[in-house]
Image: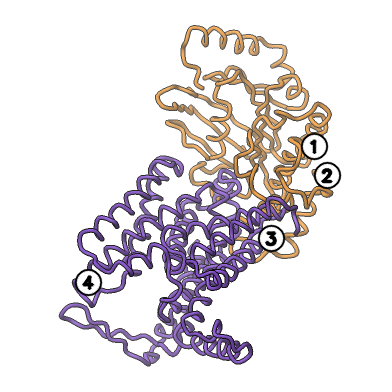
Amino acid sequence: MTRAIDVEDVTFAYDGQPVLRDVTMSVDEGDFVGLIGPNGSGKTTLLKIMLGLQTPDSGRVELFGTPAAEFSEGTRLGYVSQQSTEAETMMPVTVREVVTMGRYPHAGSRRLTDEDREIVDDALEQVEITDLASRRVNRLSGGQRQRAYIARALASEADLLALDEPTVGVDADSVDAFYALLDDLNDRGITIVLIEHDISAVAEHASTMACLDCELYEHCATDRFLESDALEQAFSSARVVSSAGLAAGD
Amino acid sequence: MGALAAVMVASGLFILGWLPALAPGAWPTLFELSLGGWSLEVPVPREWSFVTVGFPELYEAFWGATCGAVGSWLVCSGFLQRGFTAGVLIGITAPIVGTYLVNRQMALIGEALAHTAFGGVAIGLFVGAAVPRFDYPLLFALVTAAIAALGMQYIAVTTDGYADIPIAIMLTGGFAVGIAVISYGVVFSATVESYLFGDILFVPFENVQLMVALTMTVAAMVALTHKQLLFITFDREAARLARINVWFYDTLLIVLTALVVVAAMQVLGAILVAGMLVIPVAAAMQLTTGFNRGLVLSVVLGQIAVFGGIFLSYYWNVATGAMIIIVAIVLYIWSVLGKPIW
């Protein structure tokens, strides 16, 4: 089984401030990885580096066996980021149009075919927002919007889905349903990397956990992780580090 | 990407009539270009270019029929026929390009390009007065706007965004250069005014042909790339993730904006031209839920603004460019007060 993501000795500094230092981890295909850590530990940065959206200062990053910088099969990657951009709040775009964007890289310059439209319909069904298809994206609730973006990743036939704190601002019931959806997708073979604040929730669903605070503390199966001292170490030392003013990155 | 570039070049050649020139034995006309002391014969198969062959016939047929049917001076006057045609073309290209600009908060870039284009016009007028062969201010405007567009792109790439400071500097700087050049050496104030405020009465037929070429180019480019443009406009990071060449499409958009701005400057004037990029689009966004519908609607509203503006400017004896913008704003206010209709 190839590794979906392979990160080795990655270091990244932002404006001179070290954010990631010698991070090494890998994600197998079909994994469900929970990436946690205190604020400012560089989780989002690591995720972006893994997806090839950012280049590390040093170290090796590989996506499905290819160096991330040379990886060209963008359709295999899906990304649900933290906040809505300004464009998303203002632009008149329907849910269907957003999900159809997942087909654009496949289509290139040619017109969309019936097959494309079918795939879009399928994706909408899988995340259960078919009835919202004609609604403007910025009129949706937080949870509905996140589903729309997952649908977009599904429409693009992504093998890897990366989510950055997707349940921020989502009500508790929707969060449960959201995790059920992620479980479902993972069962179907989609690799999932999830950044979350709510450690217990993600520990319940993820198969492996990674805790980040400038250096990777522990990356192992969830049960062992919860039993280990890694969490305590990470968070207590983070407090120490922050109050001493040493940069944990921000 | 290569295929896309090839199609773009091919369609460009078709519009300008060069495609048959690639086939051996198809060099029907020789067009003489003389610059300075030397001259050059350029084979331009004029018979094949839509702009030089198909369009004039279409134009004559349409206006001949309309004049015959309606009979009023409004549609029979040569000046107004050209003016209307120019206006319609502007009402198509400006909202199309503007849709992508507005949704990326790049509306002021259109304004900056217009002001810089005016600087180019001033230089063109100055040079043209001294050397009559080079008396084609719009060409200078086109070159200046294109350079400004690429400069803007370079700054955006290095500073990661379209910050308002570089835009403000380009906007005022381009205009300042224009004013400086005019105060130094250009005497024809009426001509300068017509570029500043627009003059629908003095659009020569060659400029209408140029606008047809630009409209077809803009339409073709957007038709080929509208999916990528939408994706980049809506979610730049996701577009990068999908390995779409974001820089290329950004540059394309900005260059198309420069083309549209220079073409529209003749009727609306350098100062007001950005309004056509923004206002019909803003109105359409109020009235629709979908992006593609918004695009179509903004063109419709642009046309209403152009026609309404031209008619009203004649009945009330007011500057045409200003009237078009005012009608567009009235449409916008109406759209804000209303509800989504489509």
Q: Are marks 4 and 3 on the same chain?
A: yes
Could you say whether the residue bearing mark 1 is in a helix, strand or loop?
A: helix
| Residue toward you, B128 or A135 | B128
CB contact under 8 Å: marks 1 and 4: no
The residue drawn where x is 58% and y is 89% is B67
Q: In 3D space, how far apart are the residues under numbered discs 4 and 2 (Cα atoms)? A: 68 Å
Q: Select label 1 or label 3 by which is in front.
A: 3
- Chain B on-screen colour: purple
CB contact under 8 Å: marks 4 and 2: no
The residue drawn where x is 60% and y is 8% is A236
Question: Can residue B57 be seen by looking at this rendering?
Answer: yes
| Residue toward you, B217 or B340 | B340
Could you say whether the residue bearing mark 2 is in a helix, strand or loop?
A: loop
Q: Quadrant of residue B162?
A: top left
Could you say whether the residue bearing mark 3 is in a helix, strand or loop?
A: helix
Residue B293: mark = 3
**Residue that numbered label 2 is attached to:** A128
**Left or right: where A182 falls relative to B200:** right
Disc 1 chain ID: A
CB contact under 8 Å: marks 1 and 2: yes
Q: Select label 4 or label 2 by which is in front.
A: 4
Q: In 3D space, how far apart are the residues under numbered discs 1 and 4 (Cα atoms)? A: 71 Å
- Point out residue B239 in the picture as x, y percentages from the top left corner: 57, 48
**Residue that numbered label 1 is attached to:** A181
- Chain A on-screen colour: orange
Inspect the image, locate mark 3, and give the three-letter code of the amino acid beneath it.
Arg
Q: Are marks 1 and 2 on the same chain?
A: yes
Quadrant of the image for the C terminus of chain B? bottom right
The residue drawn where x is 64% and y is 48% is A91
